[in-house]
Amino acid sequence: MECDGSMIKESNSRGSDRFFTSLADGKEPHRWQRELARPTVCGNRLIRIPTGFGKTLGALAAWSWHRMHRRDDDWPRRLVWCLPMRVLAEQTESEVRAALERLDLLWDGSGDHAGKVGVHLLMGGADAGRWHLYPEREAVLIGTQDMLLSRALNRGYASPRARWPMEFGLLNHDALWVMDEVQLMDVGLATSGQLQVFRDEDQAAGKSLRPCFTWWMSATLQRGWLEKSPDAAGLTGELARNTHRIATRDRVGHLWEDVAKPLEVVPFANPNTLARDISRRHRDGGSGKSGPTLVVLNTVKRAVDVWTVLQRDKTLRSAGTDVRLIHSRFRPAERRAWREGFLNRQACAPDTNRIIVSTQVVEAGVDISAFLLVTELAPWPSLVQRFGRCARWGGTGRVVVVDFRHDSDRKAAPYSVDELDASRDACDALQDVGPLHLEQFEEENVAFLPRLYPYEPAHLLLRHEVNELFDTSPDLSGADIDISRFIRSGDERDIHVFWAEVAGHAPPSNLKPSRDELCSVPFIEARGWLCRSGSESLKPDVGAWVWDWLSREWRTVARRDIFPGQTVLVEAAAGGYRDDAGWDPMSSEPVAPVPTDDDARLVNRPCWTRDGEGWRPANRRIRVLLPEDHADDAEDDESLSVTGDWQTIASHGLQVGVEVERIAKEVVPANARLLHLAGRWHDLGKAHPAFQSSMQADDRPARNDIAKAPDNAWPCSTRNMYRIDAVDQRRGFRHELASTLGLFGVLQRHEPLHPALIGPWSEWFGAMRQTHAGDGHD
């Protein structure tokens, strides 16, 4: 029996509906979710869907349906979920894991990866797993824009330098990027658009072997936000055809019709008077009888100020009101309790006597609903997101917009007076801010939208700048190209700080931070907190260090070392953090380090040390990490060359060639044999005397082509690595570079005019060769 195209499409639609229902724990898909999954071509898309209508499940289901269920190889095998804040990344990870587990698609991290999806969280200090070792397998990579965009630019924040190129390649090929909650991404949104333009150009020119697309997603998304670049004409044309919205005919049901959110705009002079008013409104509303109260401020300082006054309010304390503070300057160890304790749907039921004081971290992705929402006046996209935290699941709520009447951009920071003025005008025109009222308001006031949704990125990533980032070497001063301006603007670019008790003058080299210890701190404020005014040096009695990739040890930090993406170790006695208030540069109380299992991970390993002109067996105490983590964390580490037995370059190269060919056959079959050959040659440089002399043992084979050796064959200290003899030590030796130079030597001998040797000068060399033909010169 023959089927026409319409019957096939209908069958696919029914199948995708059943797939979605299983993924979403029994929920039927909205019409927009069906339409998102219907096209068989992935492409670039815009998804503008109001808060509470399942954007996360919609995007995940569409990718999973085509990539995992239909096994469509034209869809990328990696889903890269990029979010503006850590709390959103953590919540998205939890939701994605639960959804994939319902379909038995979640990889457990240790068994067979085939047919399963690995879920990996990329955040400062997070154990993202070994996702970079499985380029042929499906994965969902979830992280903040800092972590993901920096890796897409070949400068991965909180990532070992040697791993940058691997992550750069994997995130710019065979990946579907979901840029979620883009209204909070600032210049990162423009960067994501430019990167996609360049990927599309490479794909059209045949330079990319696997596709890479981007879906931009937000309740307030504007197509014009991606039209700021002259490079983006082709992209914006595609997005005009591929925009997903909820049509007017579909705006029915209780989330549209059974919602009332009356709006009130109230001026206030300062946070103290605001806090007293919040206390009164919370008590007048029955102290949580209809649900909790949510307060959203624009800065951490104002949030802390309001929280402090509420904490001291005797009437709230006598009523047993639970007052909580949340913002982005807490460690994960403290944040983890939020979701379990009060940032979840179950904790928002009636008779919840709680006031939550927050910053922008609750604007998106947080599944909570308040009866009373008190929010500081903010740019319109942010206000719309905040309105979505009131009566989120239907019913009635109350919204109070706080207007401090800021008269300068300095006072209005991190926003501008113009943005706040536009939002004030919009609020004055509205009496209710339910989803239906907001959609109707924007459709009836199209001329007002440019004021409500302005977007002028401070920096625009250009093609030549991406090309320059291909070289990961630091400059002569040891500094790297600063990419932070393409990720976030202003002073909100962060470093990662962790506190530890340090005995002596310097931390041990085996001290490394765990995910739970890292606190995000604005780098400008961190400089003022740690360093003397106008000086490169630290303040007296402040101990702080950064990791030195070359010397493989912690070194004392200087002002120039404190830049976005850097990880800084601070002595616990220096203060700067409170468990209940987060990062606090005014706090001088010693910081309680997060409990870790570091002591349990310290083991004794056999090694050798110098003894006069010879060597002798010894032991060293090291922290157990994955070999690739050791190797990627320092320039002169050979942890990947440690194995259970001796192995020659030829035998190891054969094993690598076979394995890389297997992987390539699943990803880029046309290049499989070439990559097999590369695997055979990749460790040629280990034949260099500097590498061979680093391995010493009584049972060492008498040969000079050893590629891998047991633990005891390696020196206890890197100071004894690459020492050819008593006076000739090759500090900074890299066997990978020696392998490359060795291959150049082979080419020079057998094909001196190979393009790899002469680069762009092939025409010149060709002309010279003809000129000197027959003159006896080589």
Image (cartoon, rainbow, N blue to C red):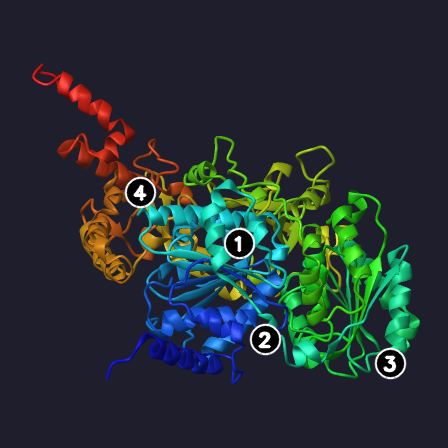
In the rendering, at what x and y percent does residue 234 appear? 45, 48
Whether residues under marks 4 and 2 lie with C-beta atoms below 8 angstroms apart, the answer is: no
- Residue 313 visible to an observer of this rendering: yes
The mark closer to the camera, 1 or 3, is: 3
Residue drawn at the location 67% of the way across and 56% of the way down: 446
Q: Amino acid at mark 4?
A: His
Asked if residue 510 can be seen in this view, the reply is: no
Pair 4/2: label in front? 2
Per the model, the C-alpha gap separating discs 1 and 3 is: 43 Å
**Side (left or right) of 332 relative to 290:** left
The picture quadrant where one finds residue 264 is: bottom right
Of callouts 3 and 4, the N-terminal one: 3
Say which label, 1 or 4, has the lower sequence index.
1
Q: Nearer the viewer, residue 296 or 257?
A: 257
Mark 4 vs mark 2, CA separation in Å:
62 Å
Establish if 49 lies above or below 615: below
- The residue beneath circle 3 is 286
Residue at horizontal 73 percent and vertical 53 percent from the top: 575
Kind of residue at badge 3: Gly
Q: Residue at x 63, y 73 (%)?
A: 52
Residue indicated by mark 4:
735
Q: Are marks 1 and 3 in contact (CB under 8 Å)?
A: no
**Residue at image mark 1:** 147
Where, by quadrant of the figure, is residue 284 drawn?
Answer: bottom right
Provide the residue designation for mark 2: 250
Q: Could you give the CA–CA distance between mark 3 and mark 4, rounded to whole angstroms?
A: 71 Å
In front here: 447 or 137?
A: 447
Q: Residue 492: image x %, image y %? A: 66, 48
